Amino acid sequence: MNKKGPIVIIEDDMDDQDILSEIFKELNYENELVFFGDGVQALEYLTHINIEPFLVLSDINMPKLNGMELYEKIHNNEDLRLKSIPYLFFSTSAEQKHVIEAYSRSIQGFFIKPSNYDRLKEMIAKIVEYWQECESPKYIKNAQ
């Protein structure tokens, strides 16, 4: 996990993208934010660029490739899997079946976006700070 890497946010709602941008700006994290409106764009970025993201925050219900399908593709890609990029669902709502499916696939977190701005900001801070403190394997490409 690259703690200085970009934070990838996969969110198809432009208003939510704007709110998250504002919150991250207020929290003053040094990580670049990279937004994608669908899972296909995010997958292309993650698989075709040599950047190692710090964190992926993904909506679950998206066009083209939903969050669960995207996670499967990332998990099945050995190079991406070895980077140990935390993948978290960050959704407006959650059906119990989605939560169960996510954790059965080893998702690192499933969060419901609060509608209250201050609560959302507090949640983002907790998530980022948790992963900043967390230890992970050091990724070295082709080091087997």
Image (tube, rainbow, N blue to C red):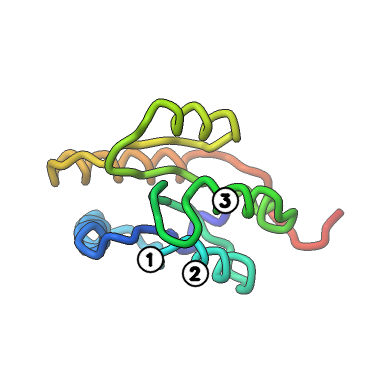
Q: Does 144 appear above or below 42?
A: above
Give the image location of residue 61, x and y in percent: 39, 49
Secondary structure category for the residue under label 3: loop
**Residue type beneath disc 1:** Gly
Q: CA distance from mark 3 to mark 2?
A: 17 Å
Q: CA distance from mark 1 to mark 3?
A: 19 Å
**Which residue lies under the disc numbered 1?**
37
Q: Are marks 1 and 2 in contact (CB under 8 Å)?
A: yes
**Which residue lies under the disc numbered 3?**
85
Secondary structure category for the residue under label 1: loop
Give the image location of residue 100, x and y in percent: 49, 26
Which residue is rendered at x = 86% and y = 53% of the image?
144
Q: Does 22 appear above or below 113?
A: below
Toward the bottom, the furthest residue is: 49
**Residue type beneath disc 3:** Ile
Viewer-closest of 143 and 115: 115
Give the image location of residue 136, x and y in percent: 62, 42
**Which residue lies under the disc numbered 2?**
41
Q: CA distance from mark 1 to mark 2?
A: 7 Å
Which residue is rendered at x = 52% and y = 39% of the image?
134
In the picture provided, is 122 more to the left or to the right than 12? Answer: left
Front: mark 1 or 3: 1
